[in-house]
Image: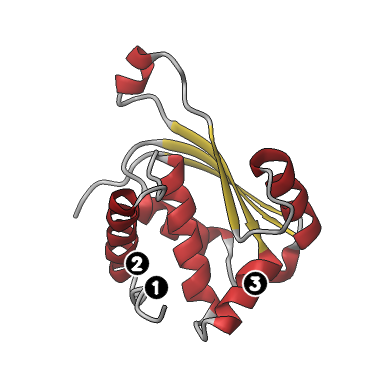
Amino acid sequence: MPSKNKLSLTVQYADASLAGIVTRPVLRRWVQAALMAPAELTLRFVDAEEARVLNRDYRGRDYATNVLTFAYADEDEESLADDATPVRADIVFCSAVLAEEARAQQKPLAAHAAHLVVHGVLHAQGYDHEDDAEATEMEALETTILAALGWPDPYLAR
């Protein structure tokens, strides 16, 4: 069994509507499954207004989105090459958008939440989906990680 990466995890429920489903132990399990390096992460669940403001202010898009990842990479190349340097990020989830997407996609709420957590953690580690090749790589990783967690491929029912 692969060893777990060191994880410092903070969970904040500014919007507690999903707190009973996405509990801290469940979140830790999902995050740990997607980690490829030590990490210091904060996961924050927010309402639609906070998500909209963050998306507008940081991405220039004036609507609430499902997940935003704020990765804090050290610009010093030497420290980036150091395996002991943890990945640092704040990952923000909009509870209302997450729940609405799960309903619209006819997926269990927990399955969609697991997918977005894995997605956000991969973003924190530098993965992206700006072009087709990056998207293919990231989606394959997500699918593999979610399968290991017992969840179906989130991209099957598009």
Q: Nearer the viewer, mark 2 or mark 1?
A: 1
Q: Residues within 10 Å of mark 3 (few under 14, many from 20)?
A: few
Q: Is residue 48 above or below residue 153?
A: above
Amino acid type of the residue that numbered disc 1 sits on in the rendered structure: Pro
Residue that carries the numbered disc 1 in the rendered image: 154
Amino acid type of the residue that numbered disc 3 sits on in the rendered structure: Gly
In primary-sequence order, the first of circles 2 and 1 is 2
Residue that carries the numbered disc 3 in the rendered image: 20
State the residue lying farthest toward the left.
1
- Residue at horizontal 35 percent and vertical 67 percent from the top: 146
In primary-sequence order, the first of circles 3 and 2 is 3
Q: Are marks 2 and 1 in contact (CB under 8 Å)?
A: yes
Q: Is residue 66 visible?
A: yes
The mark tally for this picture is 3
Q: Is residue 70 above or below residue 20?
A: above
Which numbered dot is residue 82? none
Query: Where residue 145 appears, x then y in whole percent?
Result: 31, 61
Q: Residues within 10 Å of mark 2 (few under 14, many from 20)?
A: many
